[in-house]
Amino acid sequence: MESNFSIYTTLLTMESLDIPTSNAIPAFIFGALTYCGIMFFNVSILLTLVFNRKLHKPMYILLINMPLNDMIGATVFFPHLLFSILTENRFVSYSICFAEAFLTHIYVSGLTNLLTAMAYDRYIAICSPLKYNTLMSSNNLIKIIIIVWCLDYSLIGTVFILSFRKQICSTKIVDIFCNNPSLLKLICGDTSVNNYFGLFVTFFKQGIIVLSVVYTYVQILITVIYKRQADAKRKAIQTCGTHLIVFLCLEWNLLFGLTAHRIEGASPTLRKAAGASIMIFPPILNPLIYGLKTKEIRQNLVFLFVSIE
C-alpha cells in the first residue's frame, strides 16, 4: 500500500478524456456552446417564472427549482471539463474534487426529488382536481419544497461526512468527473460503512421515488383514458408518457452508474457514459420538456424577450 497522502496538499489525477489534439478545439467550442445554451435557456425560464405573476401557480413554483438545480449541475461539470479539454490538464486538488462531488450529488438527488414532487402535483391536478387547491396550497407547497431540499442536503451531507478527513492511499480518480464512489476508492482501509450507507440511501430512497412516480403516472394514465375528451386524452398520454420515459432513463443511468463502481466486471466505458449522460442531458432536456413545451411558459417567454427589446 502506498504511503498516506495529506488530503489538503494532494493533487488528484482524473481519468483521461482521450480527445485527440486535433479535435480539442472543436470539442471545446462544442462544449462551451452547450454550456452557454444550458445557462441561457435555464436563466430565461427562471426569469419568466419569477417575474410573471400569471405563472405563480403550484406547478410553476415547483418548476422554479428545476432550472436552479440544472444550473448547479451544469456549472459543476462543464467549466472543469472545458478547462481540461483546453489545457490537457487532468489534475485537481482533493478539496476542489470533494466540493465538486458534493455538488454533483446534490444536483442528481435534487433532480430526482423535484421530478417526484412534480409528478405528485400532476397526480393531484388530474386525479383529484377538486382537492387540488387544498392539497397544493401555498403552505403545503412550501413544505414540499423544504422537504425536497432538506432531504437532499441531509442524505448527501451524511454520505460525505462519512468520507471527510479520512486518509487516502491513491490519487487516481477513475471517472471523468468527481463523485463519491471515485473518492471512496482513494481512501485507505475499510470503507464498508460508507458503501453500505451509500447503497442504502441509493436503493431505499430511489426505490421509493421510482415506485411513487410510476404509481402517479399510471394513475394519471388510467384517469385520462376514461375521459371523453379525445384531444385532452391524447395530450395527457403524450405528456405523461414522455415524462415517465425520461424519468426511467435517468433512474437507470443513475443506478447503473452508482452500482457499477462496486461491481468488478462492470464496463468502465459504460459506467463513464452513464455518469456523463446524467450531467449533460437533463440540463439540456429539462428546459425543453418542462419549459418550452408548456404553452403558458412558451408564450410568456416570448413576451419576456419582446419586453427586453
Image (spheres, rainbow, N blue to C red):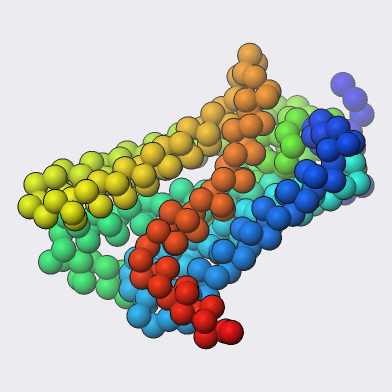
- Could you tell me how many numbered marks the image carries? 0
Residue 97 point in image, percent of width and height: 77, 47
Residue drawn at 29 percent across, 59 percent down: 121
Position of 174 compared to 196: left or right? right
Which quadrant holds the C terminus?
bottom right
Query: Which quarter of the figure has residue 141?
Result: bottom left
Q: In the depicted view, which residue is nearer to us: 153 or 53?
A: 53
Residue 10 point in image, percent of width and height: 90, 43
Residue drawn at 56 percent across, 64 percent down: 42
Inspect this view and state whether residue 88 appears: yes
Tell me: residue 125, above or below residue 274.
below
Residue 275 point in image, percent of width and height: 62, 36
Tell me: residue 102, above or below residue 287.
above
Q: In the depicted view, which residue is nearer to us: 24 or 75?
A: 24
Residue drawn at 35 percent across, 80 percent down: 54
Position of 176 compared to 46: left or right? right
Residue drawn at 67 percent across, 53 percent down: 34
Query: Which quarter of the figure has residue 137?
Result: bottom left
